[in-house]
Amino acid sequence: MPDVKKAIEGTNAVYSVREDVSSLEISFPKMSKETRADLLKATKKQAEQARQHVRRVRQDAMNHAKKLKDAVSEDDVEVQKERIQKATDSAIAEIDKLLAAKEKDLNTV
């Protein structure tokens, strides 16, 4: 149980974790302006990390597509690059959509 408690405490500083004999009690603070601001800041940070990860995956895929130039036609490589870019744009748009929804949720009193 101590490992679970430690892991939960490590995920977010706004949780308060209390350990009983056979269970854990997790309490959340009341949603003050400061708590909302902290959660919004953490959410934006996670969204940016997700965008960076998508961009790294895109770069790896683009590099892989470039290496295929010897094996396939240049047109096929360009088609793959376009597909990679569309997938990247779609993933980033989804991240932005989720972030906007969470911002709206956190800003609703």
Image: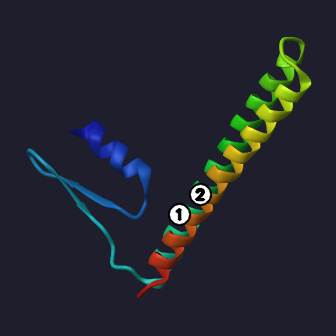
Among the 4 quarters of the image, the one containing residue 53:
top right
**Residue under pointer 1:** 98
Determine the CA span between mark 2 and mark 1: 5 Å
Q: Secondary structure at mark 2?
A: helix
Residue furthest left as drawn: 21
Can you identify the residue that label 2 sits on?
Answer: 95
Image position of 1 (left or right of 41): left
Percent position (x, y) of residue 43? 54, 63
User: Compared to 74, does 22 lie above or below?
Assistant: below
Q: Quadrant of the C terminus?
A: bottom left
**Res 99 seen here:** yes
Disc 1 marks a residue whose amino acid type is: Leu
Q: Secondary structure at mark 1?
A: helix
Q: Residue 68's mark?
A: none
Q: Residues within 10 Å of mark 2 (few under 14, many from 20)?
A: some
Instruction: Judge from the rendering whether residue 18 lies leftward or rightward of residue 77; answer left or right.
Output: left
* Residue nearest the observer in this picture, 86 or 40: 86
At 36% from the left edge and 43% from the top edge, which residue is drawn? Answer: 7
In contact (CB < 8 Å): disc 2 and disc 1: yes
The residue sitting at the bottom extreme is 109
Q: Could you say where residue 74 lies in the image, as x and y percent from the top left?
A: 91, 25
Count of marks, rendered view: 2
Q: Nearer the viewer, residue 39 or 69?
A: 69
Q: Residue 78: horizontal and vertical position, in percent?
A: 85, 33
Please rate how many residues cluster around mark 1, counting C-alpha atoms within 10 Å: few if below 14, some from 14 to 19, many from 20.
Answer: some
Query: In x, y percent, where is residue 11?
Result: 42, 50
Three-letter amino acid code at disc 2?
A: Ile
Q: Residue at x 46, y 77 (%)?
A: 106
In the displayed structure, would residue 14 be above or below residue 57? below
Q: Quadrant of the N terminus?
A: top left
State whether residue 38 appears in this view. Answer: no
Query: Measuring 53% from the left and 63% from the top, which residue is drawn there?
Result: 98
